[in-house]
Amino acid sequence: MSAPAGGPSAGPRLTALDRAPRADAHERDENYQPVFVNARRKELDELLTRYPTKMAALLPALWIVQEERGWVSEPAMAEVAAVLGLTPAYVKGVVTFYTMYHQHPVGKYFVQVCTTSPCNVCGAEDVVRAFLKQTGASDLGATSPDGRFTVIEVECLGACGFATPVMINNEFLESVSADRVPSIVGALK
Ligand code: FES
């Protein structure tokens, strides 16, 4: 006799969508401290008055989280989803789409170097190597052992005529060459 359709258990096959949902990240992290309390809650409430819907305030709400915590953790995404009436999956989709949101802790100084073609032919990769060497970060996206620097490559920063442009946190530097990097990093230590 052949096994019944659906497998030896003969029970209904569960698809990924049928399985019981995981406890969401917010519930799983018992130590999570909400961002939107006290002054940050007031800031969010004020922000919401400037947008037609709660959903429209998602990007600045995530920015508040990143300012407060340095990155956007899954429990923080769940909190944002709860306060804005969205699903955690929707919020995660937005966080993972925009490179400006950090999904992991990063260094105090977040260094973004444009390596798109126009900057690449002008020596952007040398600039990247110089930042990795000077900061002690072992690789792209890794944080230096002292916790101060994370270096990444990014796509066009909109300053193609000023290769190589570099953003360090919110500061924009133009025409950075590899030999300028030691003094730039030195000034940040
Ligand atoms: S390609 Fe580097 S800033 Fe545009």
Image (cartoon, helix red, strand yellow):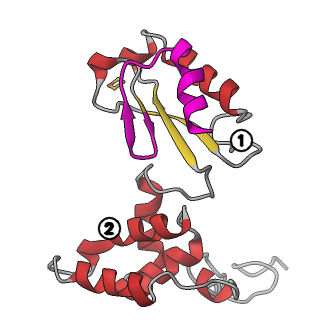
The residue drawn where x is 73% and y is 33% is 136
In which quarter of the view is residue 82 placed? bottom left
Left-right relation of 98 to 178: left
Q: Pointer 2 and pointer 1: residues touching (CB < 8 Å)?
A: no
Task: Specify start and end residues of the magenta stretch as a single range.
Answer: 167-189
Q: CA distance from mark 2 to mark 1?
A: 28 Å
The residue drawn where x is 48% and y is 64% is 66
Mark 2 or mark 1, which has the lower sequence index? 2
Residue 20 colored in magenta in the image: no
Residue 186 colored in magenta in the image: yes
Q: Secondary structure at mark 1?
A: loop
- Residue closer to the observer: 67 or 184: 184
Residue assigned mark 1 = 144
Quadrant assignment for ligand 1: top left
Q: Quadrant of the N terminus?
A: bottom right
- Residue closer to the observer: 19 or 166: 166
Please state which amino acid type lies under the numbered disc 2: Pro
Task: Name the disc covering residue 60, or none.
Answer: 2
Picture coordinates of residue 15 (x, y %)? 61, 77
Left-right relation of 130 to 4: left
